[in-house]
Image: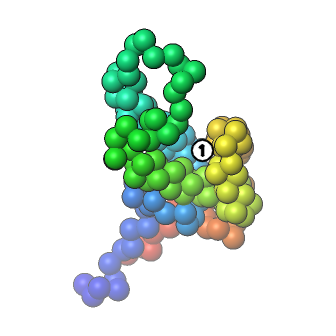
Amino acid sequence: MAINDRPANLTPGIAWALLSPIGRISRQAYWHGVFLVWVVSLIPLHMWWKTLDPSLPLSELSPSDFAGSNPLFRPLFFALTWIVLALVIKRCQDIGVTGFVALLVLIPGVDFIAVIVLGFIRSAPGPNRYGPAPDSYYRRNV
């Protein structure tokens, strides 16, 4: 069997789903990715919260206190931001709008609402200019 005669496996994997902004993603896969990001975000937040002095008033805490408490939190934050941005871009493309709309998730206050709303909008039926429907994939017949 020659190299070109092997069937193509075009099923997207988890690396594509979490890292690539190219293509379309279903609502179910989108929610799984968003849930994963939220869980991973809560782990360092919980670690930081446990190290706080209980007598410290909450009004004196700021996001910079959290970011400065561990040198790994900033790279983790940027990695999680990229994952959310990749998910939102693919979700925007799935509903048939340009991925530039995903830049809304970089605006504080709008980000959470945009992530939630995109999770409830139905996919555009059939293929669109961003690829085939997310619940289908094509394999070349052997």
Would residue 17 be seen by someone viewing this image from the given angle?
Answer: no
Query: What residue occupies the far top of the structure in this picture?
Result: 55
Q: Secondary structure at mark 1?
A: helix
Q: Residue at x 52, y 36 (%)?
A: 63
Instruction: Identify which residue, 76 or 93, lies in the foreground.
Output: 76
Q: Is 80 placed left or right of 94 in the picture?
A: left
Would residue 139 be seen by someone viewing this image from the given angle?
Answer: yes
Q: Which residue does the numbered mark 1 point to in the structure image? A: 27
Q: Is 77 placed left or right of 128 in the picture?
A: left
Neighbour tally class for label 1: few under 14, some 14-19, many 20 plus, Cα within 10 Å: some
Instruction: Identify which residue, 102 or 65, lies in the foreground.
Output: 65
Asked if residue 7 is positioned above or below residue 103 in the image, the reply reads below
Where does the image place residue 3, in percent across and percent down from the top left?
29, 85
Q: Residue at x 39, y 68 (%)?
A: 9
Q: Say what amino acid the circle numbered 1 marks.
A: Arg
Q: Is 105 placed left or right of 56 in the picture?
A: right
Residue 139 appears in which quarter of the rendering? bottom left
The quadrant the N terminus occupies is bottom left
Where does the image place residue 13, in percent across and percent down from the top left?
40, 58
Instruction: Identify which residue, 25 or 20, lies in the foreground.
Output: 20
Asked if residue 12 is positioned above or below residue 59 in the image, the reply reads below
Where does the image place residue 132, in percent across and percent down from the top left?
61, 64
Q: Residue at x 34, y 47 (%)?
A: 72
